[in-house]
């Protein structure tokens, strides 16, 4: 972090009209710049809606003296790895079940600090108009990470095409499928690749941020979709050691601001809702 600039010329060379007050003001500006620099953080987001939200939050945060540098990622794994390693100071892209699964699997010392938005997950298809129209033996794509795959399976159950073992909950796996009357072939694929799978599979579950990137409108194009209010609210996360630092409160305030709420409600056609 650069030090505040200091005068390069000896004090004797300063203009004769320079007063003590002017000197104090000059030094104060330098110190103020240092304080502002100390409130500069890097925040990891996934490309698409999360990045758009972060851009609005960035402008709001600046009013509180918090400078955000937005770092975009294309997958769901790297933002937490970068945060835990100290390459960024915060991230905004995931829901709590996913964060908890990552902490359990990788031992991350990361804590949630505030909710942002909810993206209802949907199933999409180029071949059928509803999950009920899936033919016998159809290949259906779902995510390959534990929390999102369980979520997709729950959605398949909600629409009556499979039945899960009682108590499977959000941690459901394909091994928990106890009834599959259409003999669907459930194929697990990296979340970011699911939009591309629509050319090869009968239907795929796609997280809304990736759906929007692919030009899909959840409320219009999804053949099955979660309720807007659901347990998968997205959140801001920081390293556990940082969660009580003053800049965290500023970060949460910016992401939960009226400006962000206006963006969410006015831009995304119901594909996401504020979770704060």
Image (cartoon, helix red, strand yellow):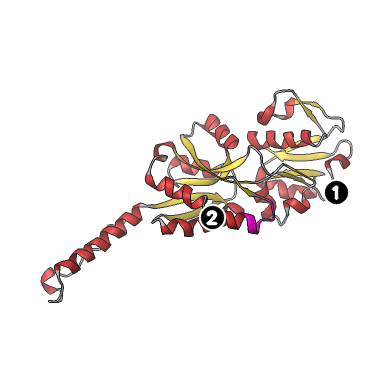
**Which of the two residues, 201 or 23, is positioned nearer the viewer here?**
23
Q: Residue furthest front?
A: 258
Q: Which residue is mark 2?
A: 258
Query: Any mark on residue 271, and which?
Result: none
Crowdedness near tag 1: few (<14), some (14–19) or many (≥20) residues, C-alpha within 10 Å: few
Tell me, yes or no, if residue 24 can be seen here. yes
Q: Position of residue 170 (x, y in %)?
A: 66, 31
Question: Please, which residue is most extreme toward the top here?
Answer: 166
Q: Earlier in the sequence, mark 1 or mark 2?
A: 1
How many tags in the picture? 2
Looking at the rendering, in which quadrant would you find the N terminus?
Answer: bottom left
Residue drawn at (54%, 50%) of the image: 45
Q: Is residue 245 left or right of residue 18?
A: right
Point out the residue furthest to the bottom here: 16
Q: What whole-number distance in Å separates the C-alpha atoms at marks 1 and 2?
A: 40 Å
| Position of 191 relative to 20 (above/below) | above
As drawn, which residue projects farthest toward the left? 12
Bounds of the magenta span? 265-271
Q: Position of residue 132 (x, y in %)?
A: 86, 40
Q: Nearer the viewer, residue 40 or 200?
A: 40
Question: Where, quadrant-wise, is the C terminus in this rendering?
Answer: top right
Q: Is residue 156 magenta?
A: no
Name the residue that disc number 1 marks: 127
- 7 versus 128 height, above or below: below
- Left or right? Give the position of 70 relative to 149: left
Tell me the element at label 2. Answer: helix
- In the figure, 201 relative to 24: above or below? above
Element type where label 1 sits in the image: loop
Mark 2 surroundings within 10 Å by alpha-carbon count, few (fewer than 14), some (14 through 19), many (20 or more): few
């Amino acid at each position: 972090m650069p030090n505040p600039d200091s005068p390069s010329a000896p004090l004797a060379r300063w203009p004769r009209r320079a007063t003590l007050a002017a000197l104090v003001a000059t030094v104060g500006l330098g110190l103020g710049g240092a304080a502002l620099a100390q409130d500069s953080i890097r925040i990891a987001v996934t490309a698409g809606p999360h990045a758009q939200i972060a851009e609005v939050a960035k402008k709001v945060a600046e009013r509180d003296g918090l400078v955000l540098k937005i770092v975009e990622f294309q997958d769901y794994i790297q933002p937490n790895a970068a945060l835990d390693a100290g390459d960024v100071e915060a991230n905004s892209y995931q829901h709590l079940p996913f964060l908890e699964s990552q902490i359990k699997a990788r031992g991350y010392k990361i804590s949630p600090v505030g909710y942002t938005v909810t993206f209802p997950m949907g199933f999409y298809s180029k071949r059928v108009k509803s999950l009920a129209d899936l033919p016998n033996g159809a290949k259906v794509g779902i995510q390959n990470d534990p929390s999102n795959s369980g979520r997709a399976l729950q959605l398949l159950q909600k629409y009556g095409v499979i039945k899960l073992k009682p108590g499977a909950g959000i941690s459901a796996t394909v091994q928990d499928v106890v009834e599959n009357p259409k003999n669907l072939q459930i194929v697990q694929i990296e979340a970011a690749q699911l939009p591309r799978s629509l050319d090869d599979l009968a239907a795929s579950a796609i997280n809304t941020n990736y759906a929007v990137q692919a030009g899909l409108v959840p409320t219009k194009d999804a053949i099955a979709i979660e309720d807007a209010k659901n347990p998968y609210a997205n959140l801001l996360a920081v390293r556990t050691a940082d969660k009580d630092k003053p800049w965290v409160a500023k970060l949460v305030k910016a992401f939960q601001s009226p400006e962000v709420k206006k963006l969410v409600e006015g831009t995304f056609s119901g594909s996401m809702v504020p979770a704060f």
